[in-house]
Amino acid sequence: MDTDRLFKENEIKANRMMTLIAGVTIAIVVVTWVLFELEFFYIRVQFRGLMVFSILLLASAMCLASHFKYEKSWIKYSLMGSVTIVYAVTTSVLTYNVVLLVTIPIILSVRYFNKKYTTSIAVLSAVVFFFAYLFGANHGMLDLNFIQYAPGTQIVTNENMWLDDAVRDIPYDHWLMIKNTIISNYFVKLLQLIIYSAAAVKLVGYCQDVMQEQKTLTENTARIGAELEMAERIQKDMLPSIFPTFSESEVFDLYASMTPAREVGGDFYDFFMIDDDHLALVIADVSGKGIPAAMFMMTAKTVIKDYALTSSDTSEIFTIVNDRLCENNEAGMFATSWIGILNLKTLVLQFTNAGHNYPIIQRCGKPCELLKDKHGLFLGCMEGIQYKQSEITLSKGDRLFLYTDGVTESHSSENKLYGEERLMSVLDDISAQSGETVLSGVLKDVRRFSDGMDQFDDITMTVLTIK
């Protein structure tokens, strides 16, 4: 028996199915027996014993299957063997009236998806139905349409036969009867049996291939799922995740979050101290989604931080980073990004925008507004780009909100965009709250606006508050 888990589960299910079929067969035999006893039709008295045998055989196989919880390898042979023998017994009684009965066990065996098993049932069927036809030819119903005698043949009447009116009192030749039964009838059935068996075995082979493909697909899916889970963990570990961060700082409060649309995403945020007096803030959105975007995201994040730690000029950082990302970028990946460096002594914020969403600035006690600056091209789009730098001075109570387009381009069920106006309105309403509460409130409002629509893009946000 194939011990592979999928084949094992299928075999147990098939055993349960065969037990049900055996139960239905018992019911049919019992009903037939009752009708016989009530004289609805005639079956010779000696066949009553075959009914008892059939019921006991099937019941025993069902009890064994249930007792061993359908899990033993021999149960399928016990169940199908019993059913095959019982169908053969029926053939011995009704002979030519049950031509298709011979095929039922072979057809049912296909359910196990096992070539060896189906072949064995085909062989068993060929043997037991052969003897059933011989027995039926001498003790079942005799019909000239079944036993093809040549015209004028002398037949001696066999008193054990249940004779059709068409052949009653015709002389009967015992050996000629057997000869014609085997040559004229059984071998025709055997040819049919071989055709059915070949088709069944071929079908089983196909089923095995399908099951194997399903097994391979399941294994690959599980492996990809595990790899995606690992990639998600690695990506999260790359992002600052301990909040409140820089809690010892008396100058600012900082909080950030990323909610990927898939297991891994192309958005990222970052913040780090360049030295004791300069804080760097970065947010970016990589083109595409999934693993390719995540790989490009990790490269971009690493390169940006490497150069930011050696320079306080944001335009210079992005100019160098862009050239680096363009190298060997055959996939044509790119990223929108925004970088800012805050001087903690003067509160002057220098920043550069590479095609990213305008940040939102909220001056103390005032409504939100877009921090519009000079846009440069996306990072990784074209070599030799010279990026521009802008600067503003922040004051106590000011708040800077950075985000990706996963926020503003969220769709409602009416296919409307969330937009910058709604975002600024929400920020105005919760301006006095902590950074964590602000981001949580925005995310809740985005999901409420989307009203059950699937998140199609990563949602990344960072909020900086001057104390």
Image (tube, grey):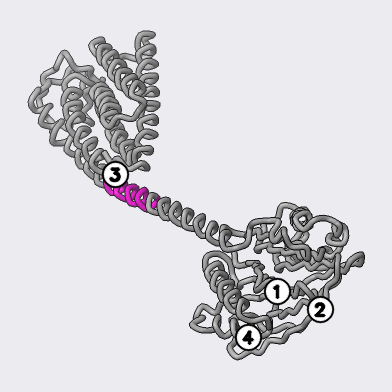
Q: Nearer the viewer, residue 300 or 36?
A: 300
Q: Which one is closest to the eye, mark 3 or mark 2?
A: 2
Q: Main secondary structure of the magenta part?
A: helix
- Gap in Å between the C-alphas at discs 2 and 1? 15 Å
Provide the residue designation for mark 3.
200
- Gap in Å between the C-alphas at discs 3 and 2? 79 Å
In which quadrant of the rendered view does residue 67 lie? top left
Residue drawn at (37%, 51%), measured in percent from left and top?
A: 210
- Gap in Å between the C-alphas at discs 4 and 2? 21 Å
141 falls in the magenta region: no
- Gap in Å between the C-alphas at discs 3 and 1? 76 Å
3 or 1: tag closer to the N-terminus: 3
Q: Picture coordinates of residue 84 (x, y %)?
A: 26, 28
Q: Which one is closest to the eye, mark 4 or mark 3?
A: 4
> Would you say the residues marked 1 and 4 are in contact, meaning their CB atoms lie under 8 Å apart?
no
Q: Picture coordinates of residue 353 (x, y %)?
A: 71, 79
Three-letter amino acid code of the residue under disc 3: Ala
- Dot 1: element: strand
Q: Which one is closest to the eye, mark 3 or mark 1?
A: 1
Give the quarter of the figure containing the C terminus.
Answer: bottom right
Provide the residue designation for mark 4.
319
- Dot 3: element: helix
1 or 4: tag closer to the N-terminus: 1
